Image: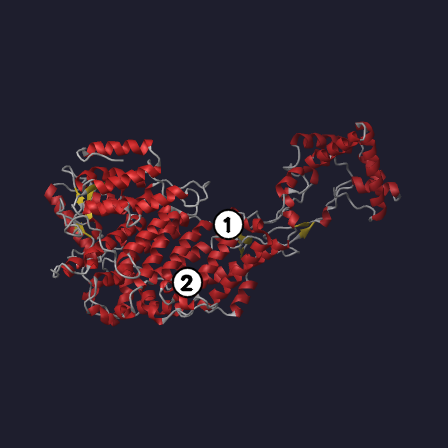
């Protein structure tokens, strides 16, 4: 497509919009490449916002754009390869971004589409702690509504790219799409590898003018003063390059801002989602005092006690629930950040190297985890642990958490030890990381315990999650590191530096790498306390992971694991016909609904014996790892087994819900109520009354059962004396009548109560006729089947009925002669 150069930008935009409807995808991309190469930045400026929205979709989620989250190479190979090439970090779209960047253009981005806490904060005229928003907020003259961020082209592009994961509607469950194969997931990986390289430096900016690379974005003056949660420091980058006047300066020092911007946008858009109350909880007293002074100044300036939006910061609660796709992308980010941070050479990572002149990329690698990720990731994980459904989809959150807890997995030396079968010992050099992330180990482990105690451990997927967590925390030397961190935190305050240095306890870990680096803190206890207080506040109550409260929870989990192993074994012992086609047989009456298995159909049943074997293996290893972590002895496990508090029937297959012994018998615990509500356990209730008066079953015809009951009652009332006389005879006829007419002796039944002892009854009924069996679907179906087979042999209904009656009389006579006389009919 060749557009004349005298064409106005509006005509260019109109032509591209028309082509987006009329031309195929491949042709549109080819035309866009030519437009980007041929047209100057002044004309490309008008099409840039439309093109970004056309690719990533609208911020309100109505327009899908190119639908990168569903685009897969194996399904649409042509469109996939074209899109990946066009959006590649070195592809045409990024060339357009850099071309506009060289002219220092700005594009408005609406604040209303930012994450909830940030949006509420900006609307109240309080600047968020992230420097990503500094000098970018533009207020309309009226204030309060219609706020925008003035972003440079690179920021604008990355904002849309990151938010398309959040704003677009979740993928329908009917689409079985593997996230790791989608174009969006792979583009995230490419951008991370390009802008956060684990080897070498960031690639220099592509030049579109004789002058070379474009400058870093110039700061803008805010339209109104802000109270900031963070500290206002000069940029480390600008400090680094302000003294460099040579044109041959290190390109990384000029271009590191792209790496920082990419990471800040990803963290802000993907992790900054939780209630604002939690967000305020983390702020230091210094920051809150600054906010208070700002509010007083605003109120006095406007001569009003409060502004219309002043309550937003206090009352706002974001109803945000991340999707599994969202969590998988965040996990990819965390894994790459660990690899990026661990790519520092040992001499660069040492404290002595900190004092020497280091490149911005090296300092960025040191700061990337504690300053950018830690705080928001902790709250994001807390939000997920507290709000995610109690099902197998939590595995995505779990693996994201475990990936962050194990930075040594992404260290360069990992490959040399990956062949070892046994758990690898965590090297001592990781102790500072463990201690400075103490809450992400201990507090979230307790949160996982509370979830595990409320789930069905018999499920293979749940058992696998418990096994994964236990295996990670059982790595040699890790538990000792966590315990050492807790000891440092619980040390008396006197061993710390003077209280006046507490200002270092609450740094803005989410603040910019571009801000000045704080002085090195050598005291390990001070570092741990700084971490805990910055995330939980100085008035937090810390529950030690190796304290008695958590140990009690672990013992309870060990008890449930033992119960789950017994339940899995019981299910494996049941005949396969009890689970295959149970519902159909129950409807036909071939399998009574009340005499089925105690356990509902789960994925354990669907997986068969292999799932049962895996469940038992996961639970066995998880219990072993928990014993290693918390030093549980065999005697304690044996005591737990004896104190399960559950009863089993004679075959050892059925267990009661979790109970405790009260004054009036067994009392359900909260776990027991949960087991009953979710169908995990139930009390075995068997009807012990008159069989004729028991409730109508699902496999019976209600009207027919009532009619047959009236008929049999009339016959029993009319011929009661004759029945007694016949059953009293001692000959064959007496035995035959007793077999068919005598009610089962209730003395043979044991009336059971979950709260008391079994008691027997000696009540008995006189001989009577029962016709209820004719009201079941099973009997009627068998009769119809017999008539149908007889009709194939040209036998009519009446002869067929006589044959059936004669056959039954022959069968009944044989049974009466073989069994003990007087045994009641069980049919």
> Seen in the image, is 65 located left or right of residue 247?
right
Task: Report the residue marked by disc 2.
Answer: 549
Quarter of image, res 586: top right
Quadrant where the C terminus is found in the figure: top right
Task: Report the residue marked by disc 1.
Answer: 673
Q: Mark yes or no: residue 496 visible.
A: no
Q: Position of residue 781 (x, y in %)?
A: 71, 34
Residue drawn at (28%, 69%) of the image: 525
Residue drawn at (32%, 43%) of the image: 164
Residue drawn at (39%, 52%) of the image: 385
Label 2 SS: helix
> Seen in the image, is 468 located left or right of residue 102?
right
Vertical order, 818 against 644 (above or below): above
Q: Position of residue 352 (x, y in %)?
A: 23, 72
Quarter of image, res 565: bottom right
Quarter of image, res 66: top left
Q: Mark yes or no: residue 190 visible.
A: yes
Nearer to us in this view, 793 or 67: 67
Check disc 2: other Cα within 10 Å, few if <14, some if 14-19, many if 20+: few
Nearer to us in this view, 263 or 547: 263
């Amino acid at each position: 497509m060749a557009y004349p150069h005298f064409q106005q930008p509006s005509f260019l935009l109109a032509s591209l919009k028309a082509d987006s409807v009329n031309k195929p995808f491949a042709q549109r991309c080819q035309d866009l490449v030519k437009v980007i190469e041929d047209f100057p930045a002044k004309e490309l400026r008008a099409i840039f916002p439309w093109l970004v929205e056309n690719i990533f979709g609208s911020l309100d989620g109505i327009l899908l754009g190119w639908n990168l989250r569903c685009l897969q190479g194996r399904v649409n190979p042509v469109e996939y390869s074209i899109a990946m090439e066009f959006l590649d970090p070195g592809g045409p779209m990024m060339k357009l971004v850099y071309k506009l960047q060289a002219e220092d253009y700005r594009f408005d981005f609406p604040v209303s589409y930012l994450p909830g806490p940030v949006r509420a904060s900006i609307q109240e005229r309080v600047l968020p702690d992230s420097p990503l928003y500094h000098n970018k907020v533009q207020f309309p003259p009226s204030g309060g509504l219609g706020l925008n961020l003035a972003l440079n082209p690179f920021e604008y592009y990355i904002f849309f790219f990151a938010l398309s994961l959040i704003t677009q509607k979740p993928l329908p469950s009917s689409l079985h799409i593997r996230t790791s194969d989608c174009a969006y997931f792979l583009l995230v990986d490419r951008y991370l590898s390009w802008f956060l390289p684990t080897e070498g430096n960031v690639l220099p900016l592509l030049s579109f003018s004789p002058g070379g690379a474009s400058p870093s974005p110039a700061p803008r003056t805010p339209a109104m003063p802000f109270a900031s949660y963070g500290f206002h420091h000069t940029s480390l980058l600008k400090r680094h390059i302000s003294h460099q006047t040579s044109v041959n300066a290190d390109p990384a020092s000029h271009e590191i801002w792209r790496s920082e911007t990419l990471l800040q946008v990803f963290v802000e858009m993907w992790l900054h989602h939780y209630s604002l109350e939690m967000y305020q909880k983390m702020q230091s007293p210094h920051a809150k005092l600054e906010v208070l002074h700002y509010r007083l100044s605003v109120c006095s300036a406007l001569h009003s006690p409060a502004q219309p939006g002043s309550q937003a910061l206090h009352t706002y609660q974001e109803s945000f629930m991340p999707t599994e796709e969202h969590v998988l992308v965040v996990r990819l980010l965390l894994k790459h950040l660990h690899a990026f941070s661990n790519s520092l050479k040992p001499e660069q990572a040492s404290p002595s190297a900190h004092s020497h002149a280091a490149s911005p990329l090296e300092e960025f690698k040191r700061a990337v985890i504690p300053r950018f990720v830690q705080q928001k990731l902790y709250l994001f994980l807390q939000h997920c642990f507290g709000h995610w459904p109690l099902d197998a989809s939590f595995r995505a959150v779990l693996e994201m958490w475990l990936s962050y807890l194990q930075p040594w997995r992404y260290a360069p030396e990992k490959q040399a030890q990956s062949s070892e079968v046994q758990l690898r010992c965590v090297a001592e050099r990781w102790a500072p990381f463990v201690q400075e992330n103490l809450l992400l180990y201990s507090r979230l482990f307790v949160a996982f315990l509370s979830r595990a105690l409320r789930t069905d451990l018999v499920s293979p997927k749940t058992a696998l999650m418990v096994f994964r967590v236990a295996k990670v925390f059982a790595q040699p030397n890790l538990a000792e590191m966590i315990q050492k961190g807790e000891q440092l935190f619980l040390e008396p305050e006197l061993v710390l530096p003077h209280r006046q240095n507490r200002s270092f306890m609450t740094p803005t870990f989410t603040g910019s790498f571009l801000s000045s680096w704080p002085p090195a803190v050598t005291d390990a206890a001070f570092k741990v306390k700084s971490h805990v207080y910055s995330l939980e506040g100085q008035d937090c109550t810390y529950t030690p992971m190796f304290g008695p409260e958590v140990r009690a929870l672990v013992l309870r989990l060990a008890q449930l694991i033992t119960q789950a192993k017994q339940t899995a074994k019981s299910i494996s012992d049941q005949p396969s016909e009890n689970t295959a086609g149970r519902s159909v047989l129950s409807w036909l009456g071939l399998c009574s609904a009340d005499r089925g298995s105690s356990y509902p159909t789960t994925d354990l049943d669907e997986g068969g014996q292999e799932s049962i074997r895996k469940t038992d293996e996961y639970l066995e290893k998880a219990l072993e790892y928990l014993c290693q972590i918390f030093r549980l002895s065999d005697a304690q496990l044996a005591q737990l087994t004896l104190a399960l508090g559950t009863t089993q029937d004679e075959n050892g297959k059925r267990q009661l819900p979790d109970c405790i012994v009260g004054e009036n018998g067994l009392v359900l615990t909260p776990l027991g109520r949960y087991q009953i509500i979710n169908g995990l356990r139930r009390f075995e209730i068997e009807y012990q009354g008159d069989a004729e008066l028991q409730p109508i079953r699902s496999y019976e015809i209600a009207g027919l059962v009532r009619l047959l009951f009236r008929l049999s009652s009339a016959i029993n009332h009319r011929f009661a004396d004759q029945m007694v006389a016949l059953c009293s005879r001692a000959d064959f006829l007496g035995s035959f009548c007793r077999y068919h007419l005598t009610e089962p002796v209730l003395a043979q039944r044991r009336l059971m109560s979950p709260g008391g002892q079994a008691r027997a009854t000696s009540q008995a009924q006189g001989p009577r006729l029962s016709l209820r069996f004719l009201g079941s679907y099973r009997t009627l179906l068998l009769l119809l089947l017999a008539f149908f087979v007889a009709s194939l042999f040209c036998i009519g209904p009446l002869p067929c009925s006589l044959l059936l009656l004669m056959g039954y009389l022959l069968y009944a006579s044989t049974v009466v002669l073989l069994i003990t006389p007087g045994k009641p009919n069980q049919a």
